[in-house]
Image (tube, rainbow, N blue to C red):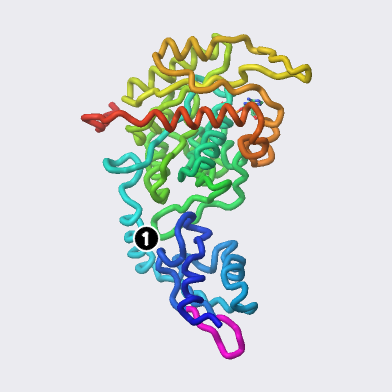
Amino acid sequence: MPDQDQLFDAVASIESPLFVGRTLGELGLVKEVSKKLTGKVKVELLLPTGGPPDGLDERLREALDGHTNSVDVDVEVMDDEAVTTWMTDLKEKSGPPIGEPGSATRTIAVSSGKGGVGKSSISSNLAVALSKKGNKVGIVDGDIWGFSIPAMMGIVNPPVMVGEMIVPPVSHGVKVMSMDYFVGEDKAVIWRGPMLHKAIEQFLKDVFWDNLDFLIVDMPPGTGDIAISMTQFLPRAQVVVATTPQPTAQRVARRAALMAAEVDQQVIGVVENMSWFTGDDGKRYELFGSGGGQALADELEVDLMAKVPLLPEMGRGADSGVPVSLAAPESEAARAFDQLADAVIEKRPRIRSNPALVIK
Ligand SMILES: Nc1ncnc2c1ncn2[C@@H]1O[C@H](COP(=O)(O)OP(=O)(O)O)[C@@H](O)[C@H]1O
Ligand SMILES: [Mg+2]
């Protein structure tokens, strides 16, 4: 029969459903685990939010399987002051916030001159491809003209407030934040001037990303105010410019690249989307022409990191909440995203002497 220590360890090693990547033990949330004479195991938890989050009951049953088939969970919820202290500790443990000196997180902004080139599809598949390679990845849906990341990633739960921090929901191993979570019906009224700026700042700074390897940002298309506000909080971002094979798309994508240069972000590469369609006859058809991605890459003096073919599953993936990199991992498109992830990993940021950024 397991002693109390073994039972405690079994519970302490459960991954938190809310703070993904951390165990209940390292979060200091397990108060006591005891076995009654009846065989029932009582688990006493101290949680920062009301009630155990979705999935915790099941994880407890799994962890204690073989020890007991009857688990009694007793949850004590921290008061506001305790939550604040606890969250401050956790933040310290997780290192400097994204964008600040010493942060180990690489921010990759996916931008384009206009909508519809597949920016969101690229962002979500890049995130998943990086995560498949063992990286801790988050993704921000910054495109307030068309939030699509939560749907593409299959997010069902909203973020959770813990103290003053926003804990993002997780899907396919990727943490997902969208401004869509915070805007009501009256979007157009909210997103103006300083309020917009403030909202974006809060959005990026008050999210508890917890020491990511990569933060992918699906940028708003174009070079307007919103794109500039986003970039102000991502001074060390590296930019991947998305484009399609035709020359017009290339022209607008080029504007996005020039803007990145203006705000001192490093453009690390180009990704061309919808490059060809492979027919049932096995032949590649270049429906939108060819050469746009390479021409843009040449002009920007960066690599063409990947060419992503047109794939009907990709449209379906957008609806089903499973990106093609997971839904059809052997497909040409998934292989292209895998290649894109490798190319991104390779482009470690160059050291900057002055990362400070001033926007007038
Ligand atoms: N390579 C592709 N093959 C098939 N459909 C694609 C591909 N890339 C994007 N799509 C589809 O095109 C539409 C626009 O893509 P999206 O990623 O939302 O573009 P953006 O974010 O640039 O507006 C979506 O319906 C998406 O599923
Ligand atoms: Mg989009």
Q: Is residue 231 visible?
A: yes
Q: Is residue 179 visible?
A: no
Residues 339 and 20: in front is 339
**Vertically, is 54 above or below 179?**
below
Point 78% across, 17% down: residue = 281
Count the numbered circles shown.
Answer: 1
Tell me if 351 is positioned left or right of 94 in this view: left
Point 44% across, 22% down: residue = 269
Q: Which residues are the magenta region?
A: 33-41
The residue pinned by badge 1 equals 87
The kind of residue tagged 1 is Met
Residues 259 and 292: in front is 292
Q: Position of residue 348 (x, y in %)?
A: 36, 31
Point 71% across, 27% down: residue = 312
**Vertically, is 291 above or below 210?**
above
Residue 300 colored in magenta in the image:
no
**Vertically, is 76 above or below 240?**
below
Q: Position of residue 228 (x, y in %)?
A: 39, 28
Q: Is mark 1 within 8 Å of ligand 2?
A: no
